[in-house]
Image (spheres, helix red, strand yellow):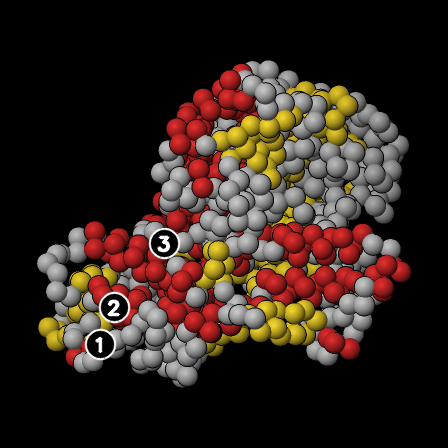
Amino acid sequence: MPFFGSKKKSKAKLEKSAGSQDSGHGAQNESSSSSQHRRGQSGGGILGRVNAGPGAFSVGDKDSQSTAVFRVTVPDNVSPGEEFQVYAGNRIVRVRCPVDSRPGQSLQITVPVDPNETNANSNGPGGVAAAQGPGAGVPGGDLPPDSPNVQRLEGQAGPDGRPAYMVTIPHGVRGGQQFPVTIAGQQLMVTCPPNARPGMSVRIVPPAPPPGVQQGSSLDRGSGGPAPRRRINKPPDGTQMFEVVVPKGVAPGQPFALLAGGVRVLVTCPTNASSGQKIRFNLPTALLQKKTDGDSLGKLAKIKLSYDKDGWTRTVRVTDLKFQWVRMDDNGDVDNSNRFDIKHSAYVRHLVFREGVDPRMRTGTLTLVKANDPRAVVDSRIKGLDGKTDLVSYSHIANVQDKSFEDKVHWFQDTCAQLCVEWNEGHMRMNVRREYLLSDSMEAVMSLSRKDLRKVWRFEFIGEQGIDAGGLAREWFQLVTEEIFDPDMGLWQSCATNQMCMQINPASEIACPEDHLIYFRFLGRVMGKALFDRQLVAGHMVQHLYKQLLGWPLLFNDLETVDEDYYKNLKKLAEMNPEEVEYLCLDFTTTEETMGDKKVVHLVPNGDQMEVQADNLPEYFEACLKYKLNGQVKAQLNELLLGFFDVIPEPLLTIFDFQELELLMCGLPEIDIDDWRDNSEYSGEYDRVGSDHETCRWFWEVVEEFDQEMRARLLQFVTGTSGVPSRGFGVLQGNDGNIRRFTIHGVELGVCLYPRAHTCFNRIDLPMYEEKQELKEKLELAVTMVSTGFDLE
């Protein structure tokens, strides 16, 4: 059934009066070249390693005007007296291996500084750098001392046993900026958390050098450099050529990750290459930022690499510069395992667009694919209004990803403004009747082309006096989204684990038998237009839907936010003995009940003929995940995404995480701190004293000092959403639908170092800190780093 022109509505909500087709409602296109109105149809603390694997990194004074000192590792297959090339700062240099050294040993080299270097892509005169200084060619040579602002935490270590350190943020460093530290002979770059300031401390666990990740060696040389040993074809203008050795264990056609000029990229091993062979590839020089004064290494373009704490990393694919997710295993290699693992495996939505019968309406197919599937990519370019030049490229996205939320929002809105159709090319007037707001609005919006969706809209409520100077538009977005998210409408329902969040009703077809999918496409367009026009929507969605909009990995534990009991039962199944699993007599089906009618759903083809056993449990968990997060509402979610991307170019969203996207779409809530405090409960170590406990008093003082964004993030951290109940915190609900007030649970400082959240119970575990400042620092880090990859335990 085509979307455009549908007149049938849900009887409960959407009946239209006779003769409504002639009442003048709908969308009108106004063009400066014509005064005729045509109804409906229009004219158309993150860590970044300075060097990883074989390569070079600075261990000396970067401000030295005469020489620069680097520490390098002798590569495999290099004998004493032989030369090898390393990337020292911004140049390729040749190093002669000392006679008393062997592969794997560290050498310290001194390289003359080239005064003519002006940017990170220039390569000064090459030459042979002699190994010298302490530890040159000597096993276990002296390492440079740790930075003075680094203190090792005795008795504390990361998940894999590596020691933990506290790093003090230096003077002059602001949130989002990087500063170097030296730890155990390695120079690392630490990103200052957004809400941190000089003098505060950040706990870090330095990563081990991953053997499978190499520093790509640039082969471009200045005219003064020596000729390479063999002829290298000159790369195309605007690109830089790199050469890298295919790591061990990588077969033809398999991808591997590496650092090329400071940018993590994904390279696929050619079919005619094998492990140990050298391959070359080109990268646009736009991916590398220009070197700034006083920064001898240059500030290289980078992307946010960490996702949660599960090892998933968004990289740039060399072949087409698109974003792709990969997971690094414990050895630092790309994890290419195919079998599902409930701890590490992830899926990403894959949406394929196709032209529809109606040129205004694209169609598409939605599937869940493995997060490291080559199809699960997002473009890094956005074309301008002319359709030819790039308005946004990878370098733009890379530059803004590490900025504050406020800066990200400004960049996003400025970019949308550049994509907006000029006023003199026409704008849209939206005429609707208040008594038939939803049906009129749906027909008006669904009659528009994608170009119309990016024009300026002006609203008019028929029969009412008023000029739309922004107020009518805000009212329209508020009223329309309130009505469509209303559970009584039948399209959405309250989430079982969080009554403040809405999830798609799998039985939406019963409420609107013939056009429920049209309303999901309509809502997607409204949500996209709201973002495009700096408006807000009135519904908070369940967390995994924001991830699906972003194209972020969906993990097994995302099931908990949809159906906690279902998730817990699957977890228990994973812990059973093999014999116990078989005794349950399960198969690859599930039963859905809708209004008393039970229906058996096959999780896989012929699922009723496939018994669940210990050896196929991973496949069963995989099928459950795909069904609950996608298959159960696949048709509705497909239309929602199609409508959303009719307005918003997908690459624009890559700068946000799922928490930021919720704040951007729903706005920063107006939080009544007095109501919040008066309707909070206390347990654990705070049970007897309650709000009079010194730590609890500090907590509320810190909350009062927070700005709106931080208060909203704290609410997200503890309850799973930034939404506030309309009747206040006194009716805050838990996962069981009962009142579960915001709870501060006291724990000893030895139990956990940072605050922990239990969103199903609206509870925060708050250690009994000895000072208010320590509480503030730890709370800020816990709240802001929940989705960025910092290990806070």
Would residue 17 appear left or right of 3 to someone viewing this image? left
Q: Earlier in the sequence, mark 2 or mark 1?
A: 1
Are the residues at dot 2 and dot 1 in contact (C-beta closer than 8 Å)? yes
Are the residues at dot 1 and dot 3 in contact (C-beta closer than 8 Å)? no
For image coordinates 44% across by 28% down, the residue present is 677
Q: Position of residue 489 (x, y in %)?
A: 39, 65
Residue underneath mark 3: 537
- Name the one closer to the observer, 678 or 318: 678
Label 1 neighbour load within 10 Å: few <14, some 14-19, many 20+: few
For image coordinates 43% across by 77% down, the residue present is 513
Residue underneath mark 2: 436
Would residue 257 appear left or right of 458 to someone viewing this image? right
- Name the one closer to the observer, 241 or 779: 779
Quarter occupied by residue 647: bottom left
Q: As shown in the figure, which amino acid type bears the numbered disc 3?
A: Val
Q: As shown in the figure, which amino acid type bears the numbered disc 2?
A: Tyr
Quarter occupied by residue 334: bottom right
Residue underneath mark 1: 17
For image coordinates 85% across by 47% down, the residue present is 77
Q: Position of residue 88 (x, y in %)?
A: 65, 38
